[in-house]
Amino acid sequence: MSTPLIVAPQEWKAAWQQLLVKEKELTRARDALAALRRRMPWQAVDKDYVFEGPEGKAGLLDLFRGRRQLIVYRAFFEPGVDGWPEHACRGCSMMADHVPNLAHLNARDTTLVYASRAPQADIERLKARMGWDMPWYTITDDFDADFDVDEWHGTNAFIRDGDRVFRTYFIHNRGDEALGTTWSYLDMTALGRQEQWEDSPEGYPQTPPYEWWDWHDAYGQHPPSRWFGDPDPDNPSDQRPPRADSEGRAAT
């Protein structure tokens, strides 16, 4: 292996700061892409789809679980897929290993579910074996074909207006590799992170950045709290909490 130059700390820091300019450009580009996603037209979903879930049959609207947004990842776990019946597809399984704690997505009125063609008994067995706890439904009709995930994995985002459902975005192929955090999932939705610094259409729900963040077992137990210092007004998308003192309190 041919290694790069070995340099002193000061030279290393200068090289890092030079590359940091490119890092910031990438951050701004991701923000701009997410803003375009929030302006994508919506596709009305007028067809009735039926899934099997742990509690029995469910329609697409039921998958929202009362929330405003829904993200559906189509995982390949079914007869004919490598690994069946002990395992799901290797790539889909790696995706499942990266699913974040769903309480944080739920706090942004968003539900994430998985869907496959395997029967529920096999899905529950697989989830128990692999330590996964996301909601996982069985596809029973043309949902996968209608939303471009019948031959390859992919992630669809939906939003509902009352009882009407709309498709808002779709990510597949290597695009799925970037998913796996609360923020990356929210960035693909119609409403985004719902924070005030975002470039969103007028009237979209937005709250101060970071204030909605909470321990995953404490959402809904108290009002949003300003647990961080004043944000940098010149870099609204770079806001970050202050360093805590030795007793774990946020510095002021």
Image: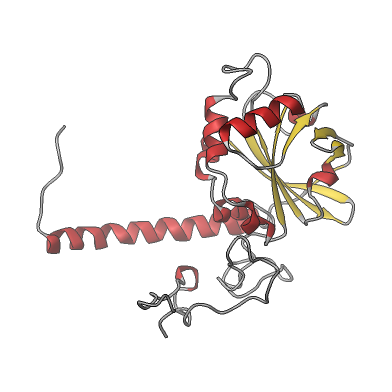
Q: Residue at x 49, y 73 (%)?
A: 236
Q: Position of residue 224 (x, y in %)?
A: 64, 75
Q: Position of residue 3 (x, y in %)?
A: 15, 39
**Left or right side of 1 for 226:** right
Q: Residue at x 65, y 13 (%)?
A: 80
Q: Position of residue 36 (x, y in %)?
A: 61, 56
Residue 154: quarter of image: top right
Q: Position of residue 76 (x, y in %)?
A: 64, 26
**Left or right side of 60 for 153:** left
Q: How is the image coloured?
A: secondary structure
Q: Eyeballing the image, is 109 above or below 81?
A: below
The quadrant of the rendering that contains the N terminus is top left
The quadrant of the rendering that contains the C terminus is bottom left
The answer to whether residue 7 is seen in the rendering is yes
Most foreground residue, 187 or 182: 182
Most foreground residue, 242 or 232: 242
Q: Residue at x 69, y 29 (%)?
A: 123
Q: Eyeballing the image, is 95 above or below 88?
A: below
Instruction: Return the residue found at the far top.
Output: 80
The answer to whether residue 149 is seen in the rendering is no
Instruction: Return the residue found at the far bottom.
Output: 252
